[in-house]
Every structure is written in structure tokens, then in C-alpha cells.
Amino acid sequence: MSEYQVAIDWERETEQFTYESYSRDHLWTFPGGVRVSASAAPDYQGNPSYVNPEEALVGALSSCHMLTFLAVAARKRFVVDSYHDDATGILEKNAEGKLAMTRVTLRPKITFSGEKKPTAEELKILHDQAHRGCFIANSVTTKVTVESR
């Protein structure tokens, strides 16, 4: 078992505390001292300059998939030179009528070097194994699709 922590801090900045007036800006502080300015999504009166939980979820899924993909590729002796993903998440009502991140599409573009490069079928298998091994994907009900480029 592993345990992960983050501290979330918010303070009221306005005299009134109403839905329209309170700031959504807050701070995420991670062990090691990394601090991230965060807010609600702009659609929910958040600051577009800061990361929001919806983007963070998409980023966590993309990052986890990439890290697992790199581990799987290395174990199979493929040499990865670069990995770039343009991930997208869709926030919409789920089957219960509640807003949820129902779908995330990963669009990784990966470059390989060396004599052993994966075929299209091997690349699909690498992504399937990465998806099945991704801790974050295993923790959410969001449908995650990989469209390799």
C-alpha cells in the first residue's frame, strides 16, 4: 500500500460570501514543496490562468498512462525517444444525470529509436497494457480511449 498527500488551501478574500462573490482560487501544495495555483474551471467562475480539477484529472490520466507505457516499453526493450500527448476530457451528464468526466481521449505521439521498433499491432498492445496497468485509470469510471498518432 502507498499513501499520497496534498494540502489544499483557500481563504475568503471578499467581505461577502455569496456564490457570485467568493474566489475559486486556491493553492495545492505537494510534499517536496511544489505549489500549484488552482481554481474552478472558467465555466464555473474560475480563473482561466490556473489549473482546475477537471484539467488535473485529464492530466493525471495522461501522465499515468505515459509513465506506465514507458515502463512497459522499456521492459519489452523498445527505446522511446519522446512522448507527447494532446489529451481531452469530456464533462457531461452521466447515466445518473450527474455531471462527470465521462470520457478522456489520449492522443499520444511517440517516437522510437534503435533497431527494435514496434509494429502498429505491437504499439496497440503496449497501449492496452499501459491502460490496464495505470493506477489512475483503474481508480475512475471515466472511459479512457487511446488514439495513437
Image (cartoon, grey):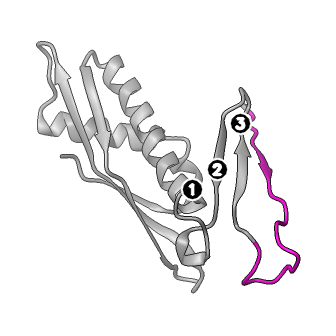
Q: Give the quadrant of residue 81.
A: top left
Residue at 52% over, 64% down: 48
Q: Nearer the viewer, mark 1 or mark 3?
A: 1
**Neighbours of disc 2 within 10 Å: few (<14), some (14-19), many (20+):** some
Q: Nearer the viewer, residue 147 or 19?
A: 19
Q: Which quadrant is the N terminus positioned in?
A: top right
Secondary structure beneath label 2: strand
Q: Are marks 1 and 3 in contact (CB under 8 Å)?
A: no
Pointer 3 residue: 30
Q: Which mark is residue 112?
A: none
Residue 121, percent from left and from top: 15, 39
Pointer 1 residue: 50
| Left or right of residue 28: residue 112 | left
Question: Which amino acid, by three-letter code, is at mark 1?
Answer: Tyr
Pointer 2 residue: 37
Residue 104, percent from left and from top: 41, 60
Q: Is residue 9 magenta?
A: yes
Label located before the other in sequence (2 or 1): 2
Q: Nearer the viewer, residue 108 or 29?
A: 29
| Left or right of residue 85: residue 27 | right
Q: CA distance from mark 1 to mark 3?
A: 16 Å
Q: Which residues are magenta?
A: 3-22
Secondary structure beneath label 1: loop
